[in-house]
Every structure is written in C-alpha cells, then in structure tokens.
Image (cartoon, rainbow, N blue to C red):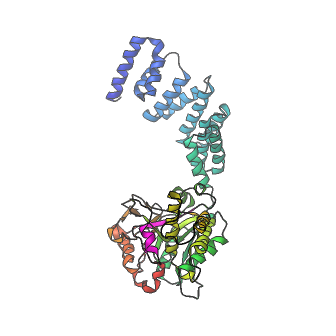
C-alpha cells in the first residue's frame, strides 16, 4: 500500500471509530467515489453485511488497481445476484470485460446478452454490446444495430455515437475505393514509382487516365477525364485522384483510415464535399488568378492554399464539382487549355465569399444570378490544412517539414503522418523524395530516384 493509501486507510479507521459500524458502507462508497481505492477496499472489507453494489465497486477497484482478475470476477458474479436489475446488468458487463482479457468469447457473449436481457432499456448495456461486437468480434453489422439502439435510448451517448461511426466505416467494402491518376507516358519513372507504392500498400484498384490521348496534354483535359471517369462509377464510391509523376503512397489507404480524416458529406448538403491537398504557396497561372490570390480566405495555417494534385471524395461529388467547374467557371472558348488549379481556386474563393458575405468576390465578372446558380450546384471544396491525408511540399520543400520517423513519413510542423506524399515542382523538388528515402535509412517503402525523368515537357503534371 502506498503512503497515500496508508493515510487514507488511517482516515477510514478514524471515520469508522467516530461514526460506528452502520456507516462503514457509506465510508466505502465515499472513498470509491473519491477514487481512493485502497481506502475504499479497506472499508469494504469491514462493511457488514455485504452489499452487492459495494461488491461491484470493489470488483472494479481490484481489477484496475490490484490487477487481481480472479477476485474481481468472483465479486462480479456475486453482484449478479443483486435485487436491483441495474446492478445485475452492470455486473454482467464487468464480467464481459474481465473475460476479454482471456479471450473467452462464448462467455463474453453470454454476459453481454444477460446484461441486455436484464436491462433492455439501458443505453450503456446496448453500447457495451455494440462496442464489444465491433472491437473484439469484428462483427460490425451487429455492432451497428446495438449502437443505434443505444442512441435511441440516449441520443447524447457520445461513446455510442463515435462507436457507431467506426462500425459504419468498417462495413464499407474495399471495392468502394479506387485510386486514379493521370499520365501520357506509360513508361515514365514517376508513374511507375506511384504504381509500385500502390502495390506495396495493397491498393488493388488503380486506374491511369490519359494514356490513350493522342492530343497534347492539358490540365483542362484532366478535368474532363476525371469527370467522365467519376460519372462511370457507383455514386458512393470513394475516389482518390492524384498526379501521376510526383506522388507516392506512404501508408495503407484502407477505407476506415480514410474516413477518420474525411468530413461527413452529409454536413455539406446533397452534393457533399471534395477534399484537396494544400500547400504554402499560391501559384497563379491563369488569367485574373492573382486577384483570387489577394482575396484568398485568411488563415494562420502553414498549408493554406489549394493544390489540385491530390483530392478525394465520393464519385458523385467529384463528378458534380468538375461538371460545375467546366460549365460555370471555365471559359466557353478554349476551355481545355484552362488550368484546373485556376478553376478550383476560383470556386474555393467564391464559396468563401458566399458563406461570409453572400456576395461574389471582387474577382468575379459574371452576373449575381449566374454566381448564385453556379455555387448552388457545386460541392463544397475543403482543404487538408494539417496534411492528415495529403503530404505536400509545395512552397516548403527546402524547409524540410517532412522527416522519417520509425520508417514512416512524418510532418514535424503539423505532427501528422500523411498517407500520400506530393512534391510538386518538377526536378528540383524531386530531390525531396531522395532526401527522405535516404534519411535514417529511408522510409519503409523503397523509393526509386526519378530525377532524370523530369523535363519541361511534363510540367503540366506538376
């Protein structure tokens, strides 16, 4: 017993001497509630007659602080004989928790079932049932039903709410995710490197668009290809699109991991949202784009500006975004020569002005009615400011935000481990791949050196 435990125990003895035997139960309850577990256990030993509710508190204290699961289990079983259903139910839930240590699955399921049978209107019982079935048994469908029922009983149960989100994410099949990229040269070192990284991390579905193009490559054409491809998919498919020559996958892109970083589409209305990577520098290429740069949404984030080289969203949201970009924001003539990043900068800034002023930005040259209609039919653009998903060196390649930590790519500025790495800028930024690949033995994916493959002819791929 620690010094604090001795002092608490002495205080308990003093209290019992003053108050008499009839108060021992009250002293034990008070000490357990104050998290003075050793003193609580001393009072529990002296409490006569035994109390099922007190036994349950003692069992939890013994389990957590004495690590005596055998005694805790014995007490929990005694507590299942209590006259109060709520105590019986809680005792069965504790038994399930104790059984989990030994992976005694049949007994765990029996204990969870007992808890629900005894207190069918207990949100806690249904929540624990759901969490066990998701986390231990990996039966997410059963978990979803239980967690939904817990929320019906108590809509404010945050444990059930977050557990339901995790269980729902786990039920999305891997076939509902596809990685798409763009290339005109099937033998380009950068493309081969991207495909190698995808294979390394077990990404089964990768589609390369543009290989059959006979005309010179333009970023406007990239928009059209992605729009056509997104329309061909099931609307709810998760579509991640990345540039072809300067991106690698750095972590597993399983659906449950992606959904932890992606905002709920329901929050953004019927067209949902599309998440883009972000970098430090605003690159203005298209006509009038410098105006949008000067009216960009303010912020203190180091990665503040949209980079179109990486994005993710539901297929229907991606298709709708690029449909709106081409119809409502691209010039009617020679649209295929427009910069995809120029159009997306415009949409992002106009959406900001729509939310904060309900008026077009000073850069918009069309009518108010056209502006209103265009934004009403455009999914919301969001940016990965913290590089949770998309690592991007744009504007900061020489500041070395990215490091290698335990074989993984780590952003020291944002304290994140991005799942993809994009080094826009051509040959001089290619050195960032090599620096990371050779740092501390390199990361766990063997990255090839593609610096000799870069020339001005591939600048369109960033």
Work out whether residue 136 can be spotted. no
User: In the rendered structure, does residue 279 fall within the stretch colored magenta?
Assistant: yes
Picture quarter with the C terminus: bottom left
Residue 298 is drawn in which quadrant?
bottom left
Left or right, 9 with respect to 69, comes to left
Tell me where residue 229 appears, x and y as whole percent: 63, 74
Work out whether residue 105 can be spotted. yes
Q: Which residue lies at the image location 46% right of the left edge and 31% below the top edge? A: 62
Indicate whether 256 appears above or below 146: below
Indicate whether 372 appears above or below 114: below
Residue range of the region highlighted in magenta in the rendering: 273-298
Q: Which residue lies at the image location 34% right of the left edge and 25% below the top edge? A: 6
Picture quarter with the N terminus: top left
Tell me where residue 416 appears, x and y as whole percent: 42, 59
Taking depth in this image into account, of 242 and 405 the one nearest to the observer is 242
Indicate whether 246 appears above or below 30: below
User: In the rendered structure, does residue 416 fall within the stretch colored magenta?
Assistant: no
Q: Which residue lies at the image location 54% right of the left edge and 59% below the top edge? A: 358
Tell me where residue 390 appears, x and y as whole percent: 47, 65
Taking depth in this image into account, of 113 and 345 the one nearest to the observer is 345
Tell me where residue 327 appears, x and y as whole percent: 61, 74
Taking depth in this image into account, of 363 and 380 the one nearest to the observer is 363
């Amino acid at each position: 017993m620690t010094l604090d435990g001795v002092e608490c125990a002495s205080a308990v003895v003093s209290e019992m001497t003053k108050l008499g035997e009839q108060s021992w139960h009250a002293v034990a309850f008070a000490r357990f509630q104050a998290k003075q577990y050793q003193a609580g256990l001393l009072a529990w030993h002296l409490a006569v007659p035994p109390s099922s509710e007190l036994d349950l508190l003692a069992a939890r204290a013994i389990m957590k602080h004495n690590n005596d699961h055998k005694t805790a289990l014995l007490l929990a079983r005694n507590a299942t004989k209590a006259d109060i259903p709520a105590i019986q139910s809680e005792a069965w839930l504790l038994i399930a928790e104790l059984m989990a240590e030994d992976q005694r699955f049949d007994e765990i399921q029996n204990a969870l079932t007992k808890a629900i049978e005894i207190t069918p209107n207990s949100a806690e019982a249904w929540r624990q049932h759901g969490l066990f079935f998701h986390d231990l048994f990996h039966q997410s469908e059963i978990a979803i039903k239980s967690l939904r029922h817990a929320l019906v009983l108590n809509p404010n149960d945050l444990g059930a709410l977050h557990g339901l989100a995790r269980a729902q994410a786990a039920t999305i099949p891997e076939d509902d995710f596809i990685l798409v990229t763009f290339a005109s040269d099937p033998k380009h070192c950068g493309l081969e490197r991207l495909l190698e990284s995808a294979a390394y991390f077990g990404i089964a579905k990768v589609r390369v668009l543009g290989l059959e193009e006979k005309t010179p490559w333009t970023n406007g054409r990239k928009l059209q290809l992605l729009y056509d491809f997104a329309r061909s998919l099931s609307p709810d498919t998760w579509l991640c699109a990345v540039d072809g020559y300067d991106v690698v996958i750095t972590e597993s892109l399983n659906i449950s991991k992606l959904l932890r970083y992606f905002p709920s589409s329901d929050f953004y209305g019927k067209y949902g949202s599309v998440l883009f990577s972000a970098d430090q520098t605003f690159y203005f290429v298209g006509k009038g784009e410098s105006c949008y740069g000067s009216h960009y949404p303010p912020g203190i984030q180091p990665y503040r500006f949209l980079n179109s080289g990486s994005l993710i969203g539901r297929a229907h949201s991606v298709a709708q975004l690029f449909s709106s970009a081409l119809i409502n924001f691209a010039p009617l003539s020679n649209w295929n020569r427009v910069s995809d990043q120029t159009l997306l900068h415009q949409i992002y800034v106009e959406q900001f002005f729509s939310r904060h002023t309900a008026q077009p930005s000073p850069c918009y040259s069309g009518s108010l009615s056209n502006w209103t209609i265009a934004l009403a039919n455009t999914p919301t653009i969001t940016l990965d400011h913290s590089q949770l998903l998309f690592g991007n060196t744009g504007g900061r390649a020489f500041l070395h935000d990215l490091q290698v930590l335990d074989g993984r790519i780590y952003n020291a500025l944002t304290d994140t481990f991005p799942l993809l790495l994009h080094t826009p800028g051509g040959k001089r930024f290619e050195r960032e791949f090599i620096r990371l690949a050779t740092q501390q033995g390199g990361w766990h994916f063997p990255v090839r050196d593609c610096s000799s493959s870069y020339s001005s002819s591939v600048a369109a791929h960033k």
